[in-house]
Image (cartoon, rainbow, N blue to C red):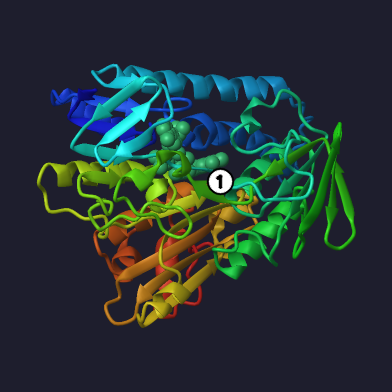
Amino acid sequence: METVDAIVIGSGQGGVPLAVDLAKEGRKVVLFERDALGGSCINYGCTPSKAFLAAAHAVGRARQAENLGIRFQVDVNFSSVMERVRSIRDSFNQGTKKRLDAGVKVVCAEASFTDERTVTGGDVTVQANLVIINTGTSSLIPDLNGLAGTPYLTNRNFFDLQKLPPRLLVMGGGYIGLELGQGLARLGSETHIIVRGDRILDREETDVSETLAQALKEDGIKLHFNTKVEKVTHDDIFTLTLNNGEQLQGEALLVATGRKPNTNALNVAATGVELDEKGYIKIDDRFQTTCSGIYAIGDVAKQPAFTHVSWEDYRRLKAILCGENRTRNDRVLGYATYTEPQVGRVGMTLEQATQAGIKARAVTLPMNQIARAIEWGHKFGFYRMVVDEETDKILGATLVGYETAELVHVFLSLMEAKATWQLLEQSVHIHPTYGEALPSLARLFIGDDMPGCPNM
Ligand SMILES: Cc1cc2nc3c(=O)[nH]c(=O)nc-3n(C[C@H](O)[C@H](O)[C@H](O)COP(=O)(O)OP(=O)(O)OC[C@H]3O[C@@H](n4cnc5c(N)ncnc54)[C@H](O)[C@@H]3O)c2cc1C
């Protein structure tokens, strides 16, 4: 058995750059990966889903151009759409391989611990004083009558689709089901989304869910709320029997009902690494598990499950390993849902701030008061900002609308700088832009009842 300086398990968004940096410093590093190099983001998450949505939203926008007086004849070449998606995915995957060539020994096998410092995978067993777990999550498949053994889709095989399913059934109203469901609907599938609760994106505020539901309905998507699937049968087509007795049929079924941590295969019982009740790895503020020398980063450590978080975990863990006094607690985190309209989020909602004991207040600017939205013909959405009443500091923002995943970065930077809403209010933003609506939003705190652009 070989002794090395560091072992990385999983080639996720944090594990790869950390392995590469350590190797570049001249340390002996072994990285285990049981599937495609680059993890979920590159192979079956962000990259293919956003490349796919570029095509789907192009179709949606072409159809919506009718509101501008233009009618397009839309012709979808589904196999070209998916070929493009797969070629982008493959090129990113090759990029990861090249990066790891910088001296990391890659073992293409599932890894598990045999004791606190020893990891085995394939025919390789190594020992190190430093072990980093970056094994991510995978789809949580419900234990449903008839589902097992059917050719259902998850994010794992969705991007291998060769033909556009004429009818698509989606189980789950979270962001994966909505993004992929809206995508296929826009490309031409008759789409049903089955939601257990009474709204989609139920971690967001109610009006976010409602706005998105309206937009999805306009795309022709049928939303089934408070509905459970009781039985699945498959015989060329899927038939779902719902708890209300209704039956739905489709050529494809996408299961997007949640995620589970990839910890089963790790055999953490051989170490002192503890898991929480859902199987996520418990870590302290400095990413250390309950076993000294073993760290966990990214989704598997129950960090907010996004690529930029896993990557930032790597930067912070690297600083910690270099002796710097860093933690994972002092960062401003945002995320986005890439439906149309998009949802750009950062920080706390008013309810979250109040629950945290902060005296907070919020203002909301509807889309119909934004000049740019009227000019472009975008009707769905609103901008909201939450501030601390005592310090005036910005605590959070929710932007629902066109490309808000971009715009929300204004708030990310302001919050990183611990800015007040007055700073935003004083900024002279360019007219006519969506960006100019942000000082307008801040102006609502001074009771300006015409906060929009001067022309409205
Ligand atoms: C459909 C979809 C869309 C998404 N879109 C976005 C988005 O737009 N923006 C965003 O920020 N995030 C998005 N995400 C989330 C994002 O993909 C993850 O948060 C991100 O990949 C970070 O994951 P990670 O670094 O924790 O691990 P992962 O990227 O999940 O990588 C973990 C790796 O570990 C490997 N592994 C697991 N167990 C073992 C083992 N025992 N031995 C060896 N290898 C093992 C896995 O095969 C995998 O390659 C999306 C996810 C999905 C599913």
The answer as to whether callout 1 falls within 8 Å of ligand 1 is: yes
Q: Residue at x 57, y 22 (%)?
A: 86
Q: Is residue 180 left or right of residue 426?
A: right
Q: Quadrant of residue 236?
A: top right
Q: Is residue 136 above or below residue 72?
A: below
**Element at badge 1?**
loop
Write down the residue under mark 1.
338
Residue 248, position as x, y percentages in the image:
86, 48
Q: Residue at x 45, y 53 (%)?
A: 279
Most foreground residue, 232 or 76: 232
Mark 1: few/some/many CA within 10 Å (<14, 14-19, 20+)? many
x 58%, y 54%: residue: 373
404 to the left or right of 189: left
**As shown in the figure, which amino acid type bears the numbered disc 1?**
Tyr
Q: Of 382 and 305, which appears nearest the observer?
A: 305
Q: Quadrant of the C terminus?
A: bottom right
Q: Nearer the viewer, residue 61 or 250?
A: 250
Q: Position of residue 442 (x, y in %)?
A: 40, 69
Q: Position of residue 371 (x, y in %)?
A: 55, 57
Examine the rendering and report whether any part of residue 365 can be seen: yes
- Count of marks overlaid on the render: 1
Residue 379 image-quadrant placement: bottom right
- Residue at point 62%, 45% (across, down): 179
Q: Nearest the camera: 57 or 249? A: 249
Q: Residue 310 vs residue 102: left or right?
A: right
Residue 429 is at least partly visible in this image: no
- State the quadrant of the N terminus: top left
Judge from the rendering whether residue 228 lies leftward or rightward of residue 386; answer left or right: right
Residue 318: where, in percent of width, then height? 20, 41
